[in-house]
Amino acid sequence: MSKIADQWLRDILRTLYQRRDLTRSEIIQATGLNPASVSHALRYMLRAGAVVKVGDLQSSGGRKPEVLNLNGEAAYFVGVDLEGHRIRFGLASLIGDIRYRWEYDLEIGHPLDSDKLFEGIRKVLKYLDSRQMARVLAIGVSYPGLLDQQGRLTAVNLGWNKFPLVAELREKASKQLPVELPVFFESDRHSCVRAERWLGCGQQYNDGLYVISERGIGTGFFLEGRAVEGFRDMAGELGHCVIEPAAEDRCNCGKKGCLESIASSDNIVRQYLDKVGRPRFREKMTIHGVYERARRKDEAALAVLARAGKAWGLALSYVVNLLNPEIIILGGDLISGEDVLVPLIKEEIGRHALPELIGGLKIVVSGLGFDIRLKGACSLAFRKSIADPHLLKKMCLPVFAGPTREADRLDAVPSLP
Amino acid sequence: MSKIADQWLRDILRTLYQRRDLTRSEIIQATGLNPASVSHALRYMLRAGAVVKVGDLQSSGGRKPEVLNLNGEAAYFVGVDLEGHRIRFGLASLIGDIRYRWEYDLEIGHPLDSDKLFEGIRKVLKYLDSRQMARVLAIGVSYPGLLDQQGRLTAVNLGWNKFPLVAELREKASKQLPVELPVFFESDRHSCVRAERWLGCGQQYNDGLYVISERGIGTGFFLEGRAVEGFRDMAGELGHCVIEPAAEDRCNCGKKGCLESIASSDNIVRQYLDKVGRPRFREKMTIHGVYERARRKDEAALAVLARAGKAWGLALSYVVNLLNPEIIILGGDLISGEDVLVPLIKEEIGRHALPELIGGLKIVVSGLGFDIRLKGACSLAFRKSIADPHLLKKMCLPVFAGPTREADRLDAVPSLP
């Protein structure tokens, strides 16, 4: 019997992680591996329990094709999402679903403390028994802002200026956590795009982009299935494209007329409040309020969204013309604006992009919602784990061969915070 | 002695083709192959003559490092450039230089005839002796316009509407040419970007773009060293990004305010003639005339170039923000505008793109000039040839083992048309 190459295991694990519920022949087709290698590797993973049979397809004769999937209990990954006002922690199973979650609200003006990070990670690990704990493989962290070459993070929302995030987490992990785990880091832009591509609506597409609108605007591209990072890992600054050079709207970046200064959630709210003469209500109003007013045909809200829709559509028409994507996934606050903002965006893209490039283009809202970065962080941990020969081996060890403590497991009902 | 893998040969050939004059250790580093494989493959190629020693480096002691390069005589490629008013044909050596050239002016209103294409190819082959002819490996064709799935080309400048280019050339090649050659096709966008990346100023860069301005505007990207093609192979339509939505300038694509409608060479000339009240002089004036007048401080020329520079700069700032390139290579008529148009473009990119993304960015004019697509077409033929096991083998056959006809070779002095 020939040796099973790690690459076969990786390819099969990645394929099942991204697509779930596949027959043997679909796996062969998707991986491009030869049938004997796939059979050989699958036999090994089925025996260990990393892969399980979940059903049979109907067959017109002969053997019914078995449907296979990953076994969610074969490995666990911790995800940490540092973006926004609320830090999120999650424990994901090998099939990418979040099992335990914890959240921590940042206090404005108080920099985040790394102890709080370990507290959150411990919270999502605490329901695992020792057998499960042994199968937690890695921690993935999705960070906003800029991580420098020395692993120091600068991120406004966390109150961090060159905070030694990488060293802090890697050094303290062994002391602060019940199990020693490697920690991997990734910019939130890439987390989002990977989550959409691997677990969301980008699964069947090779060329696309994910756009997120919250306080700011972020974009991640994937071309031929791979994330685009750029020369200094800074590709995706759609928000700072100057869409109206003559505009007076000033952006955080210092320029005027950037997409973000006109069309981010915060700036839509700003314009609405200016229009109705209540600029001081900024703390009390959110984008959802503007959407709600637009639904009630409030003219100021409609006017502000019309301008934002035009800016979004023009900016996205550039992306369509330049990169010829197959799918554009709209996330963040664009999701809840699906009825009042997204149609304007689509119309404007149609007006400005080349017709030949719009033909097959799909424009959809993200289905992953607020979980997106958390899922992205867990996917990062998965991806790094299968790349590491030691962790890959661990993932394929017999799932139920270790000690089981049934008593512990009965306690393991999650009580959400 | 272990077998030499085709992949080693390919990697070494490609590396030397792109970078020329390398030491053994530079080849090892660039290919990522193990030293034994490189030594083994190099010994084989040096013996055959595909690779030659071109010198020694100084050494502070021990053996002097040998400098190696490809042998230009080991293979030849035919390139055909179908863009513009003048069809270009070239024969390139294995080191990518054009040895023989022929050009054919298109008559306006007369569709190009495929016989004319074979005539051009025969012209660049006619100076080869039989030994050389045996080492011509392939034909690369760089085409403008759109090639459909059935291999039919639609291209305005050639007067072709669904002309069966691929079938025509592949079928007739064996009858019309003195030697049977495979024919490969590639859109001119990709030819340009490959030529710059392999033989021009993009050699040391992984993330960049090539922009060409002639009658229209074309763009090609490479990210992580690979050309970006897009979902339907149509990425790179920078020219049709709507830069001034309120403008009255109508583009060939039917929209108003596209970059091309404001900043392509033809449209710069149009605006200049409108400004000076001579709209009918269009046939007699070129972009070079506008550049010349700007150099003499003609106000109308300066104003038109100022507007074009602004539009170019704004459009390129989008590319910088979105893709974080390391290099922007300006080609076509931008080359001769290096003194009067390019500074305006650079200034405007600086005004609109994010400062963090401008830091390491290089903006240069192309050094390949009018040869760019011809070189790209020859590079296509090279690339396809090394991918084909049979042609790869042919490239590595002993160079001087075949029959030589010295008499023929003496005649082989090129007389340029």
Image (spheres, coloured by chain):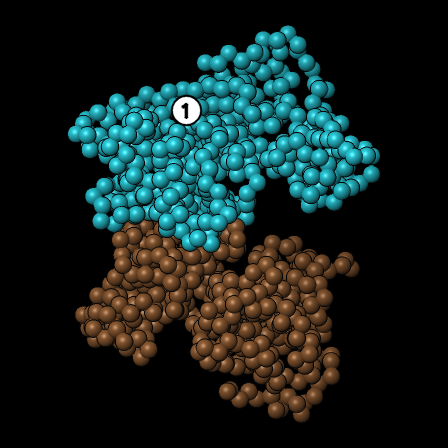
Chain colours: A brown, B cyan
User: Of the residues shown, which amino acid type is indicated by label 1?
Assistant: Ile
Image coords of residue A197 (percent x, y): 49, 62
Against A74, residue B399 (above or below) is: above
Closest to the observer, A261 or B2: A261
- Residue that badge 1 annotates: B87
Q: Is residue A368 visible?
A: yes
Q: Which residue is at the front of the view, A129 or A106?
A: A106
What count of labels does the image hold? 1
In the rendered structure, the answer to whether residue B364 lies left or right of residue B224 reads left
Q: Is residue B293 left or right of residue A81?
A: left
Using the rendered view, name the quadrant where residue B70 is placed.
Answer: top right
Give the residue drawn at x 48%, y 42%. Answer: B362
Residue in the image at 34% along x and 54% along y: A242
Please say if A26 is above or below B252: below
Residue B25 locus on image (x, y percent): 73, 39
Q: Relative to B221, does residue A138 appear above or below in the rendering?
A: below
Location of the N terminus of chain A by quadrant is bottom right
Residue A207 seen in the current view: no
Residue beneath the point at 39% across and 46% down: B349
Q: Chain of mark 1?
A: B
Q: Quadrant of residue A63?
A: bottom right
Q: Position of residue B135 (x, y in %)?
A: 62, 23
Residue appearing at x 58%, y 76% in the figure: A114
